[in-house]
Amino acid sequence: MGRRTARSAPLGGAYSADSGWTSARDRFWAGELRSAAGCAGALFAVLTLADAWKGQLTAPRAGIWAALAVLLFAVLAPARVSVDQEWLVSRGLLRRRRVRTDRLARVRWHQGTAPRLVLRDTLGGVVELNARVLVDNPLLWIALDAGVRHSLGTGTLQSGAGDLLRAAEQIDGAAARATFRASGLE
């Protein structure tokens, strides 16, 4: 009766009957990682075949093309974003960053070609997220929103409330447009 049960959710999260959503992850990360690997592999193949076609392919040149492909993969590989309880974690190829969503101190919204949300907590943790991740993964956005509301309620969020409102408007608007597009109402 009073047992906590966790079940898997189709949207990339886990649900607990007692406390609601307890964890969520970027459900499109694996596909984006495969795309990055495919682009890097295609670059290596094209450069190697072009050299072979010209008769200029040598081991050092193939090594240079392989290094260039690895560099492209490192640039294109997305960070794996997840939230568990009150921690939001971003795992890149070389490092892992995390913030406590219930102890946020500063939020900054960077507009541009790829809008980004920078979160800083009271413990010194910093995470930079692509807004597309939050649009594509509603459970991540819900968990972050709950943490932000808690931070606002406890007074730890010192700056960035206006930036967060702008981010919320854009993310919620993009999610609504995607829903309308998917249902054919646009």
Image: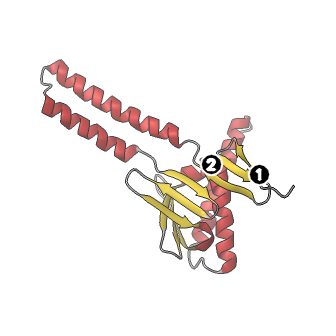
Q: Does residue 52 appear to the left or right of 14 in the view shown?
A: left
Q: Is residue 120 above or below residue 92?
A: below
Are there few (<14), some (14-19), or many (20+) residues within 10 Å of tag 2? many
Please, which residue is most extreme toward the right here?
1
> Which one is nearer the viewer's eye here, 86 or 157?
86
Name the mark on residue 165: none
Query: Which residue: 63% across, 70% down?
Result: 102
Pinpoint residue 47: horizontal percent, then vertical percent. 24, 29
Q: Nearer the viewer, residue 144 or 83?
A: 83
Residue position for label 2: 137
**Considering only order in the chain, which callout, 1 or 2, is on the residue closer to the N terminus?**
1
Mark 2 or 1: the one toward you: 1
What's the amino acid at mark 1? Thr
Find disc 1 in the rendering and name its residue.
5
Instruction: Answer yes or no: is residue 109 visible.
Output: no
Looking at the image, residue 135 lies above or below residue 100: above
- Secondary structure type for disc 2: loop
Q: Quadrant of the C terminus?
A: top right
Query: Image quarter for residue 107?
Result: bottom right
In the image, residue 42 lies at what x, y percent? 34, 29
Residue found at x 71% / y 44%:
9
Q: Is residue 71 left or right of residue 109?
A: left
Task: Kindly report the distance in space between the C-alpha atoms of the residues bearing marks 2 and 1.
Answer: 23 Å
Q: Residue at x 67, y 44 (%)?
A: 11
In the rendered image, is residue 99 in sight?
yes
Quick one: SS at disc 1?
loop
As shown in the figure, which amino acid type bears the numbered disc 2?
Asn
